């Protein structure tokens, strides 16, 4: 009951606060403000959402491996992140030292306020029904943004994956890295411990974020580079959240036995 109340309160808080921040972004765009100004406004709301999750719902985060991030104002990178819930989409811009550009499906642009704001930021929205054109757009925009010191962030599994499970790692992020000649940085996130996949009710706890060492894309093939990313992330997820993977293994074993 308390978790439901806290989750409802946090959702209401985000809904109320996203409106003025969206209006500020729209106004900034109308007045010709540069992309970094609009991003800073959005980043403040995202940080507010993360901070309010801590205060209202007791969801905290702990980051390790931050020393693995590239240094320098224009050091390019592509972040490849485990995706379990909405939490990490708010958290990453709040904790990263560089502006981030998400690669996301264009349907999100129609989401009231949140989507409208994203449409006025320098992000990369794609039409998944047009794969070739979509990837060309990702490469073109991705290269331009990284030259400006913006890091590209992608979720290689493509969608939110339930705790203890693994999705199919797609090679879009590593293909972009190879095309642009930049390193990839694998990141493991245990957000589903507190903010379950596609669930309304959240619970207090600590979300662990582990940042791996940068992996060079020079001379690599997309598939084997992504395999290295996947291997690191999934091994790190097992280390950070062994309970979830043990439970998932038990469920899988029961399913196999029931079919035998």
Image (cartoon, rainbow, N blue to C red):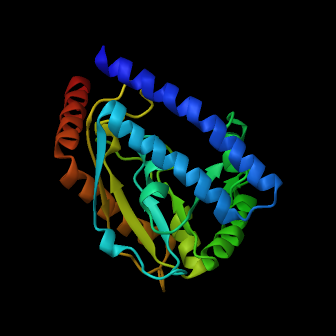
Q: Position of residue 80 (x, y in %)?
A: 45, 62
User: Does residue 169 appear left or right of residue 142 in this picture?
Assistant: left
Please determine whether, in this image, residue 3 is positioned above or below residue 125: above
Q: Position of residue 129 (x, y in %)?
A: 72, 47
* Quarter placement of the N terminus: top left
Q: Position of residue 87 (x, y in %)?
A: 42, 43
User: Residue 219: x percent and y percent?
Assistant: 48, 86
Please tell me which residue is depicted at 28% across the width and 68% down the height of the picture: 65
Q: Residue sitting at 20 percent across and 28 percent down? A: 254
Q: Is residue 166 above or below residue 228?
A: above
In the rendered view, tell whether residue 145 sits above or below residue 58: below
In this rendering, position of residue 171 left or right of residue 238: right
Which residue does the image show at 17% across and 40% down from the upper left? 243
| Observer able to see residue 200 | no
Most foreground residue, 74 or 250: 74
Instruction: Tell which residue pokes out farthest to the bottom in this image.
Output: 219
* Residue 258 occupies quadrant: top left
Q: Quadrant of residue 60?
A: top left
For the point 67% across and 57% down, the residue is 38
Rendering quarter of residue 151: bottom right
Q: Is residue 157 left or right of residue 166?
A: right
Q: Is residue 69 visible?
A: yes
Q: Quadrant of the C terminus?
A: top left
Along the line of sight, the residue nearer the viewer: 204 or 252 = 204
């Amino acid at each position: 009951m308390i978790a439901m109340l806290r989750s409802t309160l946090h959702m209401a808080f985000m809904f109320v606060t996203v409106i003025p921040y969206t209006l500020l972004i729209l106004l900034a765009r109308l007045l010709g403000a540069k992309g970094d100004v609009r991003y800073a406004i959005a980043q403040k709301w995202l940080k507010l959402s993360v901070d309010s999750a801590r205060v209202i719902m007791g969801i905290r985060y702990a980051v390790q491996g931050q020393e693995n991030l590239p240094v320098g104002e224009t050091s390019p990178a592509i972040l490849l992140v485990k995706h379990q819930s909405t939490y990490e989409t708010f958290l990453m811009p709040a904790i990263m030292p560089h502006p981030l550009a998400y690669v996301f499906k264009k349907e999100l642009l129609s989401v009231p306020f949140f989507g409208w704001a994203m449409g006025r930021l320098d992000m990369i929205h794609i039409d998944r029904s047009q794969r070739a054109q979509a990837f060309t757009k990702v490469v073109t925009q991705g290269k331009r943004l990284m030259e400006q010191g913006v890091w590209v962030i992608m979720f290689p599994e493509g969608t939110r994956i339930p705790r203890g499970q693994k999705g199919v790692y797609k090679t879009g992020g590593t293909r972009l890295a190879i095309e642009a000649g930049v390193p990839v940085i694998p990141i493991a996130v245990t957000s589903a411990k507190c903010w379950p996949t596609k669930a309304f009710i959240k619970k207090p706890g600590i979300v662990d974020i582990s940042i791996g060492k940068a992996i060079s894309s020079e001379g690599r093939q997309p598939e084997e580079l992504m395999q290295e990313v996947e291997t690191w992330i999934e091994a790190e997820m097992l280390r950070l959240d062994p309970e979830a993977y043990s439970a998932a293994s038990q469920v899988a074993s029961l399913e196999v036995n029931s079919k035998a």
